[in-house]
Amino acid sequence: LLSGDTVTPLNDAQQGGSTFVNGLNNAGVAVGNVDFRYGFRAVYWKDGTSIDLEPYTDGDWVYSSANGINDHGDIVGFTGLGSAKHAFVWKDGQIQDLNTLADLTGLPQTGYIAFESAFDINNAGQIIAKGPNQTIYLLTPSVPEPTEITMMLAGLFVLSGWARKRAAFSKHAQKAIA
């Protein structure tokens, strides 16, 4: 990784294998995988140090790769055990199977669609993922509902406007009586 006049090595000698870099964001955080004894693991590099994402470790041998990262630090990729692969998104230090997040309503295929790999994520949170039959999908997050605090602030704004109008009317009524 080159930053100005500084070159930062991204290999991971502690793992003892090859390093593959698949993505880089504007903050200089890179994602990819490190080959280790029996396969490869998803990692990201920040300031030259690799951090293992290791999705879904439950004692079984798992292989994984981080394929894309946006400027918010959200990471996408895949994890697998044997021939079964699942796409994941890593956000705020938590990893989630993309298949549990996607709304599959209205897709032309019938049955369960398993997203097996995610390739990239942009700053709007849109994800490019591969599903069955090598079909590529663009997944767009839904617009979040207004939060309770937003609704409360809107209500206070309306009430303050009503209170100001009432006070002005009262003042005008008092002058008319006097």
Image (cartoon, helix red, strand yellow):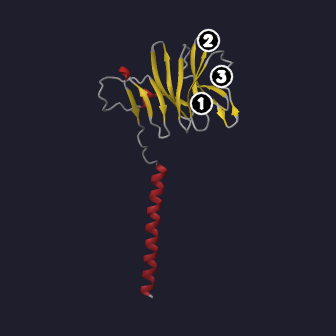
Quadrant of the rendered structure where residue 117 is?
top left
Residue reaching furthest to the front: 5
- The amino acid marked with disc number 1 is Ala
Tell me the quadrant of the picture where the N terminus can be found.
top right
Alpha-carbon neighbours of circle 2 within 10 Å: few (<14), some, or many (≥20)? few
- The amino acid marked with disc number 3 is Asn
- Which of 36/25 is in front? 25
Above or below, 29 relative to 52: below
| Numbered badge on residue 11 | 3
Q: Residue 126 location, x and y as percent? A: 45, 36
- Which residue has dot 2 on it? 37
Above or below, 161 relative to 66: below
SS at circle 3: loop
Q: Residue 44 location, x and y as percent? A: 60, 28
Q: How many marks overall?
A: 3
Q: Could you tell me how far apart the alpha carbons at marks 3 and 1 are, in whole angstroms?
A: 12 Å
Alpha-carbon neighbours of circle 3 within 10 Å: few (<14), some, or many (≥20)? many
- Which of 123/167 is in front? 123
Residue reaching furthest to the right: 6
- Foreground mark, 2 or 1, reads 1
Q: Residue at x 52, y 30 (%)?
A: 68
- Which of 81/138 is in front? 138
Alpha-carbon neighbours of circle 1 within 10 Å: few (<14), some, or many (≥20)? many
SS at circle 1: strand
Precedes in sequence: disc 2 or disc 1 = 1
Q: Could you tell me how far apart the alpha carbons at marks 2 and 1 are, in whole angstroms?
A: 22 Å
- The amino acid marked with disc number 2 is Arg
